Amino acid sequence: MTPDKQALRSEVLALRESLSWEEISAGSKKIAERLFSLPEYRQASAVMYFLNFGKEVDTLTMVPASLAHGKRVVAPKTVHCERRLLLSEIRDPALDLAPGRWGIPEPRLERLQLVDAAEIDLVIVPGVAFDERGHRLGYGGGYYDRFFAGLRPGVPLVALAFELQVVPHVPVDSWDRRIDLVLTEERNIDCRRG
């Protein structure tokens, strides 16, 4: 990993950590409204969410809303030894999810309802920092970079982030895949333009 990526990751995570829980909650509500009004969301039958931890955008409150909208909701379970994601359908968050490694909510092993990546119509992507060209700085594990390769061509990748996570430039490697849209509490950034 380049020193540039490490430095940017540390800088943006420190900024995000400075947000209050009230700011996280209020910003997440605005971001959810933006997501639910997207044509890409409305057209999707199966939506994959990252499940938030720490001071990420609160996606855990979006899961029940998506179920109420009649969506199939999918969440990842990490397979650490292989550095990949298993996908499982979530029908009842209270029963289907539990804290996994690092305390991140994950599908419970005994309640896995495996889903193939090819069935997913929209992916809600985590990340530390994003730029307006759709470049994404993740947490460094490479799980999502490997996962993206299994999606159908054209499946929209939508990042949910706080405005302070949008930076002028994210350093990229040849294998990094661009995000299509970044939604913040202030705006929708369509990275497919230009």
Image (cartoon, rainbow, N blue to C red):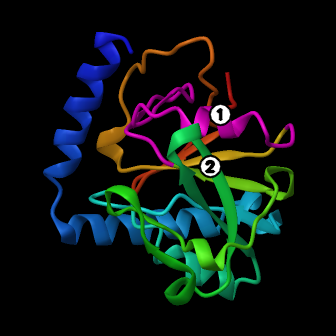
User: Type of residue at label 1?
Assistant: Arg
Residue at image position (59%, 71%) is 109
Question: Is residue 49 rendered to the left or right of residue 46?
Answer: left
User: Can residue 190 be seen by looking at this rendering?
Assistant: no
- Vertical side of 151 occupied by 66: above or below: below
The residue that appears at 68% across and 29% down in the rendered structure is 193
**Quick one: label 2, few (<14), some, or many (20+) residues within 10 Å?**
some
Residue 147 belongs to magenta span: yes
Determine if residue 52 is in view.
yes
**Image quarter (top left, top right, bottom left or bottom right) of the C terminus:** top right
- Mark 1 and mark 2: Cα distance apart in space: 8 Å
Where 172 falls versus 58 (above or below)? above
- Residue annotated with mark 2: 85
Residue at disc 2, secondary structure: strand
Between residues 44 and 126, which one lies in front from this camera angle?
126
* Nearer-N-terminus badge (1/2): 2
Residue 179 locus on image (x, y percent): 61, 35
Tell me whether the residue at label 1 lies in contact with that at label 2, contact meaning CB atoms closer than 8 angstroms.
yes
Q: How would you classify the magenta stretch by its main secondary structure?
A: loop
Residue hosting label 1: 146
Give x and y (percent) for residue 92. 61, 88
Residue range highlighted in magenta: 126-153
Question: In the shown orientation, is residue 158 left or right of residue 121?
Answer: left
Three-letter code, disc 2: Leu
> Element under label 1?
helix
* Residue at image location 28% in from the left, 21% down from the top: 6
- In this rendering, the answer to whether 57 lies above or below 154 is below
Q: Nearer the viewer, residue 167 or 10?
A: 10
